Image (spheres, rainbow, N blue to C red):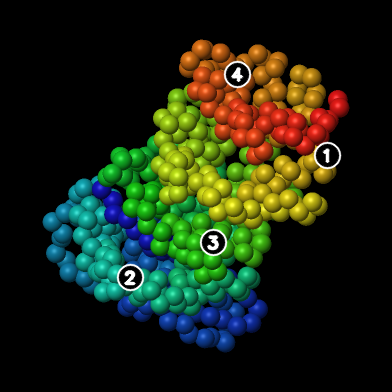
Amino acid sequence: PPQIKEEEEELCTSQEGEQLVLKQETDTFMLTPTNEEKQLVLKQETDTFMLTPTNEERYGSEPEQNSDHQLLSHNFPVADSQDQKESKDVDPGSKTHCNTQTGKKSLTCDTCEKVFKNKSKLKIHRRHHTGEKPYSCKICGKAFRYNSMKLHMRTHTGEKPYSCNTCGEKFSRASTLKNHLRIHTGEKPYFCETCGKRFRTSTGLLIHMRTHTGEKPYTCNICGKKFSDNSAFSKHTRTHTGEKPYSCSTCGEKFSNRPILKSHLRTHTDEKPYFCETCGKCLRSSKGLLIHMRTHTGEKPYTCNTCGKKFNNQSALTKHTRTHIDQKPYFCETCGKGFSTSSILLVHMRIHTGEKPYSCETCGKGFTTRTRLLVHMRIHTGEKPYSCETCGKGFSTSTRLLVHMRTHTDEKPYSCEECGKGFTTRSILLVHMRIHTGEKPYFCATCGKGFRTCSASLVHMRNHTSEKPPQH
């Protein structure tokens, strides 16, 4: 089975053997490869900004054998000549072929039949099959197939020598900067021949192609779940180990992967760099924008295998799936109650702490979640964005509309296990169940009398205060 690698950015960059050529009017920066690391050499003679990958980055990826590689070979012909000077001994796990037109020899991997033009690339490739990782970090012990130790060490030192001239963001690798620059330029040079979708990186295209082929080469040894890319596999593995290696420098909250941390940091800065061109709504992450766009297109690509219900994002499907198997992996340490998601547990914990971090600017009322605050604000604005298609009645929340629709369909999805009586909502069923259990959780503070519902206790309290009930 595959081993857990670095985050997605490291996976992508290790596979990017590419070169960036950007024309500028003045200064030139040329990065030329050495045996182990790129060095920055200032040039003032031409007007070219050129990034070239290290030997490890060039040989760490097989997919990129296109014009980018040809350009690299053109700029540095010595590299190819050095490869040709290597030992002529054929690797036991390979076959040698000769091109009759050019007279050049090529080597083929015996395991997967992939063709390489020199022994060094084949040798590195074969480590994917053998699992060999001859290079290891002395600090954390992580092993690598390629001699990319200097690049890896930047994860410990925090060094980021490459910066974007447009937004100032810094990167530890030249190839990561190159991919980032395409966000500003909009360039997507890689496209899927099946559906035409375009991508900024060859890795993105490779992972996308698996949606057509159904290939999922990464398998979890614990639960058997399969994944199409190594990054998703690594993130999933942390759900079993509980590892959260990324922490927020502002509040200390920890996260299982870097993109979630990056999105979280924007909650402190209130930065929302992604905006919807349809409605103008701004979002903190590109993934959030993608999911939001589906509210306009109506796309729901995730389907429940049990009931067939469709969802516009994977997270919503995962939460829904737990309703069928009654899975509640998150537990409250105070009362022991279980929850299907960590976010619901976090909201629940505020019951014990009394925390209400969201306040109404109009009346000052506090709420435990942002959603409840938004719903409350509609009381002040009178907004009712959800309308019944049958009778036209408006509602402030989609949940209230859903319950209302059952008055037209006569649907009663919640049934009492004791008497079989059906109800339109779970809350009404819970109140009904108290008839059978005798539970009366609401008590009068004056006389101690118990009631099944909050509303019944409030009506009773008026007997003590002589307050008259509201007239309808």
Q: CA separation, marks 1 and 3?
A: 36 Å
Type of residue at label 3?
Answer: Lys
Q: Classify mark 3: residues with Cα within 10 Å, few (<14), some (14-19) or many (20+).
A: some
Q: Which residue does the numbered mark 4 point to in the structure image?
A: 423
SS for callout 2: loop
Q: Earlier in the sequence, mark 4 or mark 2?
A: 2
Type of residue at label 4?
Answer: Phe
Closer to the eye: label 4 or 2: 4
- Residue 148: numbered disc: 2
* Left or right: 227 as drawn, with respect to 174: left
Q: Is residue 314 visible?
A: no
Residue 456 percent location from the top left of the image: 68, 28
SS for callout 4: strand
Q: Earlier in the sequence, mark 2 or mark 1?
A: 2
Q: CA separation, marks 2 and 1?
A: 60 Å
- Residue 382: numbered disc: 1
Q: Which residue does the numbered mark 3 point to in the structure image?
A: 262
* Left or right: 26 as drawn, with respect to 151: right
Q: Classify mark 2: residues with Cα within 10 Å, few (<14), some (14-19) or many (20+).
A: many
Q: Earlier in the sequence, mark 1 or mark 4?
A: 1
Closer to the eye: label 4 or 3: 4
